[in-house]
Image (tube, grey):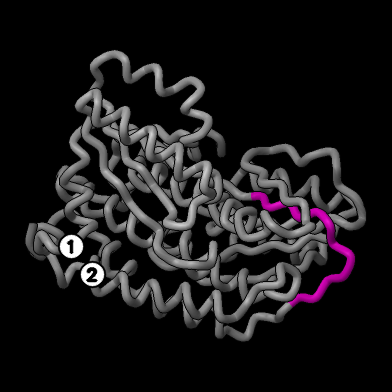
Amino acid sequence: MDSSVIKKYDKEGMIQIYEKWPEMAKNAFNSEYKILDIQGINHIIFAGMGGSGAIGDIFEAILSKTNIYVSVVKGYLLPKTITENTLIIITSVSGNTVETLTVLENAKKSKAKVIVFSSGGKCEEFCKKSNTEYYKIQKIHSPRASFIIFLFSMLKVFQNIISLKIEDVNEAINELEKLKKKIASHNLTNSNPAIKLAENITNVPLIYYPHGLESAAIRFKNSLQENAKIHVISEDVVEASHNGIVAWEKKSIIEPILIEGKDDYKKTKERWSILKEYFISQNIKFNEVFANSDSILSKIVYLMYFLDFVSIYKAIMLKQNPTPVKSIDFIKSRLEE
């Protein structure tokens, strides 16, 4: 792979946007967005689809060890457990996501506090008319490329509510900066780990993950599907040990990718060890990806950055432009009829 091949297929310059992610993250967190301090919240609902929904997955992971109950809504319907102590956070990068707009309309009829993030669109219009708290965040290139701006802007806004440590934010940004030096397009050699993994994906990948890193695995699945235009499967490694593992008793074109944290729960580490032992005994080749940071935020951001680069390189290897999503556009156009 060389730079001329990237330019040929990455016509909209997606990879150049990703190379700015560390700077974009830093600028977003240091923005002038108002930091909220809402008391008495014991239930937070994150609503959004696609990349916007992935933001909810990350917050759910960050809040998993707190006393705040988190729901992630990827669809039309809100849970029935909403009270005056519920905070509903609605995210749509475009501001025009049909499912999210439906949730927004219903959220305003509830007792909950509602806050909306978008780059404009119908969400902004609705919020102005209904006097709903609204944050306008810049969209750059595409929703998935804009992900990092939305994530770190929202971390800034909610840092008090989620008891976010500033050192965790700084650590995450530093991880992005260090990783960029290894995986960006200035290094198109075999020493680039993102290119290596992309080369090893030759058929349908099956992504195994531990519960705490589910958001990174789902993001990887979605990015491979949107950027490289390939089918992808994902499974929780512990749950798969009770069902999905049996499918390996037959020869398969599926290729396992194991997403692991170096400080995974000890029982999960034991599961990884047994799974690898089984794969080796059955001559099943597998790839491993490790999150090597301390905080859950750093782990997930590190993995998402690395794996999104993998998906872009894979797209280029398959002679695909990573930006267009014609199938999604088709469905959206039919929904608007």
Task: Report x, y in % for residue 268.
Answer: 50, 42
**Residue 36, located in which quarter of the rendered image?**
bottom right
Residue farthest toward the top in the current orientation of the protein: 250
Q: Tell how many labels.
A: 2
Q: Residue at x 60, y 80 (%)?
A: 166
Q: Does the magenta stretch include residue 11?
A: no
Q: Residue 182 carries which label?
A: 2
Residue 81 lies, with reference to residue 16, above or below; the image says above
Q: Residue at x 58, y 51 (%)?
A: 57
Q: For mark 2, does the 10 Å Cα neighbourhood hold few (<14), some (14 to 19), or many (20 or more) residues?
A: some
Task: Report x, y in % for residue 222.
Answer: 41, 44
Q: Residue 192 carries which label?
A: 1
Q: Residue at x 75, y 66 (%)?
A: 128
Q: Is residue 270 left or right of residue 310?
A: right
Marks 1/2 in contact by CB < 8 Å: the verdict is yes
Region of the chain picked out in magenta, as a range: 36-47
Q: Which residue is drawn at 45% across and 45% down?
A: 269
For the residue pair 132 and 192, the one nearer the viewer reads as 192
- Of marks 1 and 2, which one's residue comes earlier in the chain? 2
Tell me the kind of residue under disc 1: Asn
Residue 96 lies, with reference to residue 332, above or below; the image says below
Tell me the kind of residue under disc 2: Lys
